[in-house]
Amino acid sequence: MTERRPLTHHEILRLIEPFTRRGRHVDLAASDRTERRLVFKPIAHGDDAALRATEVLQLDDLRPNVWRLTRKTALPTGETAKLVAEGPDLGEVLERIESVPLQAHFVEVGAVVFARSYRLEPADSSSGALKVLTTAEARLNGLTLSVKTSTAKGYPTEIELSPQEDQPEELPDDLLAALGRDWSVLRRRGVAWVGTLRAPGREPDRSRRIEAALERGVAHLAQTLAEPPRRFHQKYARARWGVAFRRTIPLLGATALLAGALAMVFVDLPQDSPLGLMMFNAPPILLATLFTMQEIPRLEIPAAPRASRASSWFPQRGQNPPQSPEDLNTPESVKNSENAESCQNVDRNVLPSEV
């Protein structure tokens, strides 16, 4: 593979022409000519300092006549989101990026800011560019929810719950699975917990369904973490038993197949019997089906759902001395109480509409 030469001064002047016409100026100090990457100066949106969003554009030369434009948006509170578009025409790529408002990236789910990143894909002129969800993040009370969608059609979305400062009490593996069949159980990986969310369908409906499910999941986690752990079992006891039963289905199915195979030994079937032919070819068919599945089923016997005896999801917080009546009236305590009550409101944009 031949090494590509750095960007020349004349190339830069030609490339930034569509951007300068829109009031965007290149930041040569932040750019990298050797990597053929241009970074534009940040632009602040919004008059209110608390709602101000900072936007930065980055242009990368992927290969001849193919450019990638990335818009990075950051809020003062630390949430960030990206929007990516590719194409040979820089003016058209920039128009696609600017057609998506900044507030589309940030949604308030109760008191939690849910940040979502997208990739723009070409579509019919009637519908415009397809906005495909790529990643998402929500900073909860003590945990960070990170989401990464798969580029393969029909594959589930990856979910990770990682601690922020205090290591939480062992989270129940059905913390999200209690919401429905689309959610998998959580598995421990290092200090984090990972799971998946089923995402069938085609774009743009697929991304919309994922967004709706994730907003519900964020609201559920915010409410659950704001309450004692035992409340989770009290509210979702029936759903947790349903999750336990679903987890035993692979084992029950394997046991039934084994029992059927053993029973065939004691049954005298004719050589041309359809049932005998089916039982003879069942193992390779099942093996081929297993490899085509998106997730390999686990043969397990889950523990019976039980209510936690812990006083808090975070043991270090539970060790803190009890608050006095005066402390309960502090602005921070009042804010935490309001957060728990408002976690079901999932349709408000963080940024003002004029951004």
Image (cartoon, rainbow, N blue to C red):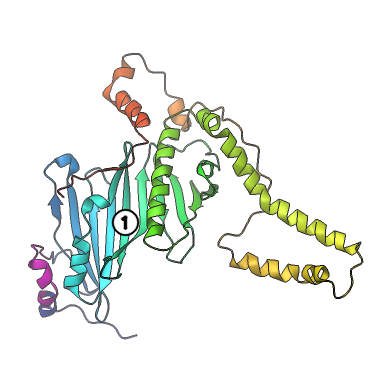
- Across and down, in percent, residue 312 comes to 48, 29
Q: For the residue labelled by badge 1, is the local secondary structure a helix, a strand or a loop?
A: strand
Neighbor class of circle 1 (other Cα within 10 Å; few <14, some 14-19, many 20+) is many
Q: How many marks?
A: 1
Above or below residue 84? Residue 141 is above
- Which residue shows up at 38% across the image and 57% down it? 207
Tell whether 210 sits left or right of 307. left
Query: Magenta segment: does it hold 84?
Result: no
- Across and down, in percent, residue 102 comes to 22, 53
- Across and down, in percent, residue 210 comes to 41, 53
- Which residue shows up at 15% across the image and 41% down it? 49
Above or below residue 242? Residue 125 is below
Viewer-closest of 271 and 354: 271
Above or below residue 197? Residue 171 is above
Viewer-closest of 179 and 278: 278
Q: Quadrant of the N terminus?
A: bottom left
The residue at which mark 1 appears reads as 117
Asked which quadrant contains residue 101, the reply is bottom left
Asked which quadrant contains residue 31, the reply is bottom left
- Across and down, in percent, residue 200 comes to 47, 59
Tell whether 11 sits left or right of 337. left
- Which residue shows up at 57% across the image and 59% down it? 295
| Magenta highlight range | 13-26
- Which residue shows up at 90% across the image and 63% down it? 267
Amino acid marked by disc 1: Ser
Viewer-closest of 344 and 175: 344
Tell whether 87 sits left or right of 322. left
